């Protein structure tokens, strides 16, 4: 809805009032949401728990000393990188040892947060699992261990949100923006917030569907993976007949192409799937000195490229790196927090990457189409998100 066509129309409108070099900056300001997204709300909720821990001197000392000890002893000893499976497992073991020293009221707050947000990394097939209670305890150790007062972090985030709204209001007044564009811009920001809510609702629904999918797999005597590869009518027919064509499902596990058009859907396997997949790969990418896209959040940054597609890639991400992805999702937000800039192939100004980058004030270029195929881990690039250019 708010991708290329409407974005370009808004840019054309802005060009009537301002010089070209200001178009992207003003576009980001004017489309600023008037409400906080669930991503931002979750982060603030968690910081409030950290705030309670920080205010209690004994609890603050407990968490901070564990973080310092773990970072200086264990991490250095084994050469571990943050967010790798080995690092997370070892940190979880260390956190478990102080569990009985954590006050009940803190544990109660963590439990409440866990029950409210545990599902948000489940994603589409559930491979990533869910956040555990211990995950949030580990995050508390990280936040407290960094030595920054959570109250100041919260205050800074709230001040930045208010500042962005003030900038938006001032710019609307300066450019004398009235309806219909005022309504469009208000709806634009509302849509960004609603889009995050929709994503969270989708993820939760997928999580809640798992028992149903397991039951289908049990009745048809097939794997959960096979159930996910079936079309709706195939599930219905299979349950009625008490069996399915397993040979077709085996082929789909190897390679399958899903095709949909109004009036029907098809799944191609075998030779047909290989031919279609080969045709889809025939995208000629000419050598280029720069990659262009839309501006998600203005700013500039130079750093080392890290291709982050899924959660298991996050271990290679260091603070200050440039995060490059096809499209971002809630399950890689920990890596996004470390990025000095974000670059994606897909998505428009209301995409997850654009929303998160604005809330974290990280330069972001979206919709580049080719970033993960042109760039590779270790490349040094400059991201000019004022112009939507990576070079």
Image: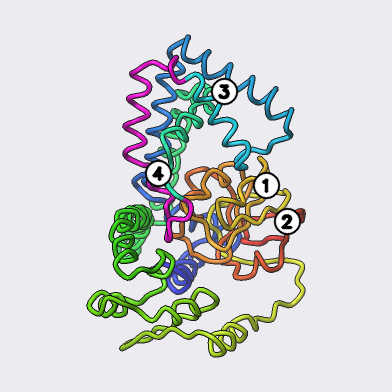
How far apart are labels 2 and 4 at the CA level?
37 Å
Residue at the outermost left position: 240
- The residue that mark 4 highlights is 165
Disc 1 or 3, which lies upstream in sequence?
3
Which secondary structure lies at badge 3?
Answer: helix
- The residue that mark 1 highlights is 316
Disc 3 or 4, which lies upstream in sequence?
3
- The residue that mark 2 highlights is 377
Which secondary structure lies at badge 2?
Answer: loop
Please state the horizontal and vertical placement of residue 162, each as a whole percent of the image: 40, 38
- The residue that mark 3 highlights is 145
Number of numbered tags placed on the structure image: 4
How far apart are labels 1 and 3 at the CA level?
21 Å
Tell which tag, 3 or 4, sits nearer the viewer.
Answer: 3
How far apart are labels 3 and 2 at the CA level?
29 Å
Q: Is residue 84 toward the left or the right of residue 346 in the image?
A: right
Decide whether residue 103 is among the magenta residues.
yes
Report if the CB atoms under discs 3 and 4 are less than 8 Å apart. no
The residue sitting at 58% across, 54% down in the picture is 364
Which secondary structure lies at badge 1?
Answer: helix
Please state the horizontal and vertical placement of residue 159, each as a whole percent of the image: 44, 33
Report if the CB atoms under discs 1 and 2 are less than 8 Å apart. yes
Look at the image and give the residue range highlighted in magenta.
Answer: 99-128
């Amino acid at each position: 809805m708010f991708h290329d066509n409407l974005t370009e129309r808004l840019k054309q409108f802005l060009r009537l009032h301002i010089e070209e070099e200001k178009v992207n900056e003003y576009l980001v300001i004017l489309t600023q949401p008037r409400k906080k997204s669930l991503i931002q709300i979750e982060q603030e909720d968690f910081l409030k728990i950290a705030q309670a821990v920080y205010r209690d001197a004994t609890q603050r000392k407990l968490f901070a000393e564990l973080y310092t000890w773990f970072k200086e002893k264990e991490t250095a000893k084994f050469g571990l990188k943050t967010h790798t499976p080995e690092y997370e497992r070892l940190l979880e073991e260390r956190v478990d040892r102080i569990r009985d020293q954590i006050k009940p009221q803190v544990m109660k707050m963590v439990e409440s947060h866990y029950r409210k947000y545990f599902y948000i990394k489940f994603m589409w097939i559930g491979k990533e699992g869910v956040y555990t209670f211990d995950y949030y305890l580990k995050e508390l150790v990280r936040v407290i261990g960094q030595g920054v007062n959570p109250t100041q972090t919260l205050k800074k985030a709230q001040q930045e949100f208010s500042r962005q709204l003030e900038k938006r209001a001032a710019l609307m007044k300066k450019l004398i923006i009235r309806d219909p564009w005022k309504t469009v811009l208000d709806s634009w920001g509302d849509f960004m917030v609603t889009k995050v809510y929709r994503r969270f609702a989708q993820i939760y629904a997928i999580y809640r569907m798992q028992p149903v999918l397991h039951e289908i797999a049990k009745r048809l005597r097939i794997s959960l993976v096979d159930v996910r590869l079936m079309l709706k009518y195939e599930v219905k027919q299979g349950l009625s007949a008490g069996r399915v064509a397993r040979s077709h499902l085996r082929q789909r596990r190897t390679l399958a192409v899903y095709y949909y058009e109004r009036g029907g859907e098809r799944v191609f396997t075998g030779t047909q799937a290989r031919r279609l997949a080969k045709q889809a790969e025939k995208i000629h990418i000419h050598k280029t000195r720069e990659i262009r896209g839309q501006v998600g959040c203005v700013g500039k940054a130079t750093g080392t490229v890290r291709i982050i597609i899924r959660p298991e890639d996050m271990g290679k991400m260091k603070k200050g790196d440039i995060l490059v992805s096809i499209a971002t999702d809630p399950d890689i937000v920990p890596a996004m927090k470390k990025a000095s800039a974000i670059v994606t192939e897909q998505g428009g100004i209301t995409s997850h990457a654009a929303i998160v980058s604005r809330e974290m004030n990280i330069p972001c270029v979206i919709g580049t189409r080719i970033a993960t195929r042109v760039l590779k881990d270790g490349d040094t690039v400059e991201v000019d998100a004022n112009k939507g250019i990576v070079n």
